[in-house]
Image (tube, grey):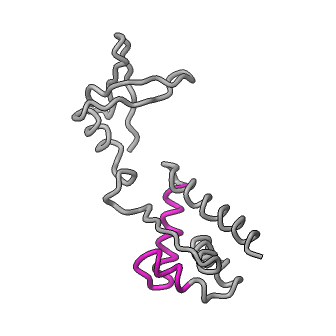
Amino acid sequence: MKLPLFTIFDSMWGNLERCYQLHDSTRQITKLIYQEALTDNAYSNLLELQKEAGLLSWNKAGEKECTFACHLTKKLEIEVTWDPFNEYTIASAPNITLATLSIKAGLKLTIQIKGEQVRVRCLSIDEDGFMTTTTGQDKMYSLRIDE
């Protein structure tokens, strides 16, 4: 009888992961939902919440998306290790920091220009927040770095 629970589990955790990956207000809202689930229940991490969320009723757990996702892990007797908003992960770094590192390391990036995926190397960042890139084939592009 766990198959329907696995379907809901996959949907819930998949949605949280997709929302986390977006670099817009969706990510910010997901961060608030995540932090709220931890602070409302006085837990320091997601594993603690998973252990205790299983003790909540279906309806009570379902009031908050993250708490409900954790409730499902306990019901399915599995554990999810996920620390999406750790300030020390690359996904939490500001874009300007990532751009600076890519210049220093000489990384090649794949970006979309006019609907086409293009490999570029970052060359510099100007004071207005634009990054100059090159394809290595004498094509230069200037890209705005989002805050």
Q: In which quadrant of the rendered view does residue 102 lie?
A: top left
What's the residue at 42%, 76% (across, down)?
Answer: 45
**Furthest residue to the left?**
104
The number of numbered discs placed on residues in the rendered structure image is 0
Report x, y in % for residue 130: 34, 30
- Between 124 and 9, the one lying in front of the other is 9
Left or right: residue 72 versus residue 36 is: right
**Position of residue 103 measured from the top left corner of the image (x, y, whole percent):** 26, 32
- Magenta highlight range: 26-52
Would you place residue 123 above or below residue 9 in this image? above
Q: Residue at x 67, y 61 (%)?
A: 11
Residue 118 lies, with reference to residue 37, above or below; the image says above
Task: Classify the position of the N terminus by image quarter.
Answer: bottom right
Residue depicted at x 48% and y 48%: 23
x, y percent for residue 34 = 50, 69
| Residue 131 belongs to the span the image colors magenta | no
